[in-house]
Amino acid sequence: MNSLAPDPARPSVDHSDLPLPDFDHVLIGHLPSRIASLDEASVAQLIAYEQQHGHRLPVLRVLENRVEALHQGAPPSDSELASGMPESAIGPNRGSKVSPATAGPPIDPAVNSILTNPTQR
């Protein structure tokens, strides 16, 4: 099976119908763990979408390898990564913990210059 070549017979796949939210933004290194819980039909849906839109060869290779693994009997896993985006921020923005109270002491450039460094004299 060579799904790397576009298949004009496949129906168009809408982004909202994809089994992974924000599939377009998943990092290539995270993709294998994100698709591990998908069945063959879901991975085929991702392949069709990728062929019709981005046609990124590394992404298609990962998807093709997963289909091949499923053909050879690899079961879909119970991965929790499929539901969340590990590369996106989780939780509310709590702001910076840096404040004047936590800042370091002011730096005097003259103290740190080469001319006043005792090891340089």
Image (cartoon, rainbow, N blue to C red):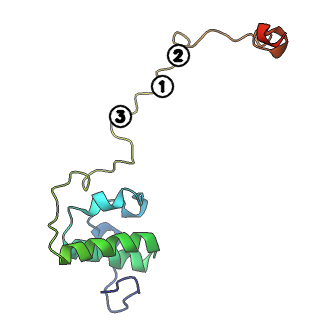
Q: For the point 75% across and 13% down, which residue is it?
A: 112
Q: Which residue is mark 1?
A: 96
Amino acid type at circle 2 is Ser
Label 3 vs label 2: CA separation?
19 Å
Where's the C terminus, which quadrant? top right
Instruction: Name the spot of residue 63 as percent of width and height, x first.
Output: 33, 72
Q: For the point 74% across and 10% down, which residue is it?
A: 108
Could you say which disc has been placed on residue 92 in the image?
3
Towards the viewer: 47 or 61: 61
Q: Is residue 85 left or right of residue 110?
A: left
Amino acid type at circle 3 is Pro
Q: Which residue is mark 2?
A: 99
Amino acid type at circle 1 is Ser
Q: Contact, CB < 8 Å: mark 3 with mark 1?
A: no
Instruction: Name the spot of residue 69 as percent of width and height, x first.
Output: 23, 72
Instruction: Name the spot of residue 52 as percent of width and height, x first.
Output: 41, 80
Density class for disc 3 (Cα within 10 Å; few <14, some 14-19, many ≥20) is few
Q: The residue tagged with tag 3: helix, strand or loop?
A: loop
Towards the viewer: 108 or 51: 108
Q: Quadrant of residue 95?
A: top left
Q: Quadrant of residue 116?
A: top right
Density class for disc 2 (Cα within 10 Å; few <14, some 14-19, many ≥20) is few
Q: The residue tagged with tag 2: helix, strand or loop?
A: loop
- Above/below status of 28 relative to 12: above
Q: Contact, CB < 8 Å: mark 2 with mark 1?
A: yes
Q: For the point 20% across and 54% down, which residue is it?
A: 79
Could you say which disc has been placed on residue 16 in the image?
none
